């Protein structure tokens, strides 16, 4: 493709050096903490620390909650993204603002807002608690907190993906005899697939990494980020290393896997 | 029969289609021709059900389609530029289209049959990005036809192809229509496509249908000024009215009798001394004096298209005259020539009615106007 070869051409144009220099500065700054942190990791024994009951529980809780929050965000968020990409309606701007709002809220505020909505002593919270499903200090509560802060990522990214799909492709599919839902599943989603997938990855990354909102909803049970905070308070930065490395590893594996899956689906 | 009645589509204050009515017979190749923004594509999308009309109805074989969703209309559609599914091979594209349809056919055989109909059997397993523009268009045709739709809708399907390929695809579309005999609605702004392909042409202007007829009828007897100008090229001869009833117009020393003007439906009643435009097609003019009307002029422009050329002369009587010649003409720019016009091919308009020249004769006494 002509476009790709132009895009990937080596920097031959004048001023290219400046772009490289500026890029390197940021990359170095991003890399530095990682290197420093991994220095520390040599001094702590990671695997034994992770098998401690508290750490193992935190890993288990994170691996349970973040995927559930991601799936929920995708189930409800992808259709919303499609509606926003395809339809105009009264109050659309308001809906769009609402979708972005959780991104700009400080997570602690998001947590506080959630507590006023679904906290133990609220109507909703007590309703569920009375039926054996407490929404605070529970895995369900953690999922809700993660969903609140992470769902916008899949909505915003998938929306851009759907907007890039030519409407005529959907028209063609409809005229061939496919219902709107089947057209959405067979044509729109595969064609917007990369973007939808990117949105899902971002959502997962945010969900598994969320600290503030999760801590407000549930001091216990702990997820990896809240456990890391606890370790830090008792043992300083070094104590955070094992769980932090584990969190990094999980995120990295997920990102690489989805990139690989994305490449497979478009091969 | 596909019947469009009083179709109207309003976008805010703008009327994209204005009470359009058109009937298309089974097996007919009907072209909707019009300049950009005339409502052609909106009409097509309304037929397909992708645009909901503000008013009016669309019926197929007597069944009202207006509230039927697109997937239940049994229409094939090919869009301007590419609408192939990039994530499927050519064959998968066609198979996808056949997907929801049932019939007493073997699926695989039928897909093969339609790939072969469009001459793409060898490219079945290629992805769209590996195909050329013409090949992609062929797959789109196969995809739109494989489930035997009642009507095939084509929205400027040759846009974006180069000249040679356009000509080739035009012949292909013609051949495929002959082989399948599917009722076809073809949307284009290109008059030569319309004239070549169609059984009938509906000319659209500003959302309204201003003429319907065979290519020959519309070209030779255009019913109004818009069609005259839009379909084919035409020369405008600035005449002057010398008699009102019957109407007689003088130009270049000739009197053109145009018969009685029906004052009904005539916006401005013409009066003696008014300007009156006469029209004639380039093929009704020769670069040689004739028994008809001879006018002198200077050649100002010559355009060649190989087998045909167009010579433009600035007449001494006023007005540019375009002349079609076979092959390259024997004249040069700047040269003064005498051209002959076939008087039967000269016409004019009074309001909405078309007036033909009944007799043309030399004016004995030049009037002062």
Image (cartoon, grey):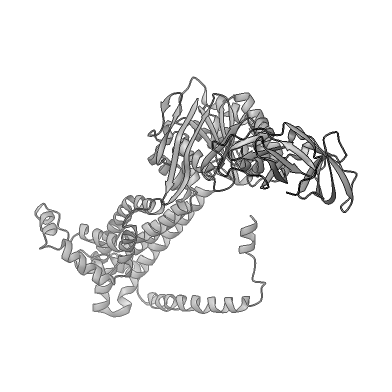
The relative height of residue A86 versus residue A39 in the rendered view (above or below) is above
Residue B133 in percent (x, y) is at 65, 44
The relative height of residue B107 versus residue A107 in the rendered view (above or below) is above
- Determine the residue located farthest toward the top in the rendered image: B104
Residue A37 in percent (x, y) is at 40, 77
Which quadrant of the view contains residue B360? top right
Relative to the observer, which residue lies in front, A175 or B297? B297
Q: Is residue B146 left or right of residue B343?
A: left
Relative to the observer, which residue lies in front, B219 or B134? B219
Residue B338 in percent (x, y) is at 87, 44
Relative to the observer, which residue lies in front, B111 or A244? B111
Q: Is residue A219 left or right of residue B206?
A: left
The relative height of residue A125 versus residue B169 in the rendered view (above or below) is below
Q: Is residue B160 left or right of residue B267?
A: right
Write the residue at 24% across / 71% down. A109
Is residue B222 among the parts visible in the rendering? no
Residue B125 in percent (x, y) is at 60, 38
Is residue A140 among the parts visible in the rendering? yes
Q: Is residue A66 left or right of residue A23?
A: left
Write the residue at 82% across / 42% down. B306
Relative to the observer, which residue lies in front, A71 or A186? A186
Total marks shown come to 0
């Amino acid at each position: 493709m002509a476009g790709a070869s132009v895009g990937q051409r080596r920097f031959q144009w004048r001023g290219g050096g400046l772009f490289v220099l500026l890029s390197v500065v940021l990359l170095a700054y991003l890399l530095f903490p990682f290197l420093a942190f991994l220095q520390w990791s040599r001094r702590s024994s990671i695997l034994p620390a992770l098998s401690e009951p508290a750490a193992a529980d935190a890993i288990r809780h994170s691996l349970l909650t973040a995927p559930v929050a991601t799936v929920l965000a995708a189930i409800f968020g992808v259709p919303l993204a499609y509606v926003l990409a395809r339809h105009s309606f009264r109050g659309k701007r308001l809906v769009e603002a609402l979708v972005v709002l959780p991104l700009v809220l400080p997570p602690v505020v998001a947590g506080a807002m959630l507590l006023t909505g679904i906290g133990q002593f609220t109507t909703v919270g007590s309703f569920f608690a009375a039926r054996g499903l407490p929404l605070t200090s529970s895995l369900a509560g953690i999922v809700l907190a993660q969903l609140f802060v992470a769902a916008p990522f899949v909505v915003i990214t998938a929306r851009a993906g759907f907007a890039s799909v030519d409407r005529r492709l959907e028209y063609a599919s409809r005229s061939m005899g496919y219902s709107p839902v089947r057209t959405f599943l067979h044509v729109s989603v595969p064609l917007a697939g990369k973007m939808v997938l990117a949105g899902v990855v971002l959502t997962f990354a945010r969900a598994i990494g969320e600290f503030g909102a999760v801590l407000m909803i549930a001091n216990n049970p702990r997820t990896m980020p809240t456990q890391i905070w606890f370790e830090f308070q008792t043992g300083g930065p070094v104590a955070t290393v094992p769980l932090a490395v584990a969190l990094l590893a999980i995120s990295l594996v997920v990102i690489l896997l989805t990139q690989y899956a994305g490449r497979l689906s478009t091969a | 029969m596909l019947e469009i009645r009083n179709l109207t589509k309003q976008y805010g204050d703008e009327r994209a289609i204005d009470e359009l009515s058109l009937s298309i017979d089974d097996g007919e190749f009907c072209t909707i021709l019009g300049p950009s923004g005339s409502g052609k594509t909106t009409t097509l999308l309304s037929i397909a059900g992708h645009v909901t009309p503000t008013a009016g109805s669309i019926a197929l074989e007597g069944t009202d389609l207006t509230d039927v969703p697109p997937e239940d209309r049994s229409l094939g559609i090919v869009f301007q530029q590419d609408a192939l599914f990039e994530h499927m091979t050519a064959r998968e594209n066609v198979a996808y289209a056949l997907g929801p349809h049932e019939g007493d056919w073997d699926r695989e055989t039928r897909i093969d049959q339609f790939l072969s109909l469009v001459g793409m059997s060898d490219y079945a397993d290629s992805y769209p990005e590996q195909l050329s523009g013409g090949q992609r268009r062929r797959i789109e045709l196969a995809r739109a036809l494989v489930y035997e739709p009642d009507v095939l809708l084509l929205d400027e399907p040759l846009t974006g192809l180069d000249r040679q390929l356009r000509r080739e695809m035009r012949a292909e579309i013609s051949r495929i229509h002959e082989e399948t005999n599917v009722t076809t609605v073809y949307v284009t702004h290109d008059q030569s496509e319309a004239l070549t392909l169609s059984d009938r042409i509906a000319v659209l202007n500003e959302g309204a249908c201003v003429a319907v007829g065979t290519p020959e009828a519309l070209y030779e007897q255009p019913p109004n000024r818009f069609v005259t100008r839009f379909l084919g090229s035409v020369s405008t001869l600035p005449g002057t009215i010398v008699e009102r009833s019957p109407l007689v117009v003088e130009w270049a020393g000739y009197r053109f009798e145009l018969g009685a003007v029906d004052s009904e439906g005539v916006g401005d009643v013409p009066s003696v001394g008014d300007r009156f435009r006469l029209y004639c097609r380039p093929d009704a003019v020769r670069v040689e004096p004739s028994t008809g009307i001879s006018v002198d002029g200077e050649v100002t422009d010559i355009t060649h298209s190989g087998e045909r050329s167009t010579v433009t002369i600035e007449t001494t009587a006023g007005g540019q005259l375009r002349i079609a010649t076979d092959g390259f003409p024997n004249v040069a720019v700047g040269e003064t020539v005498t051209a002959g016009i076939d008087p039967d091919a000269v016409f004019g308009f009074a309001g909405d009615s078309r007036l033909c020249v009944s007799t043309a004769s030399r004016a004995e006494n030049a009037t002062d106007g």
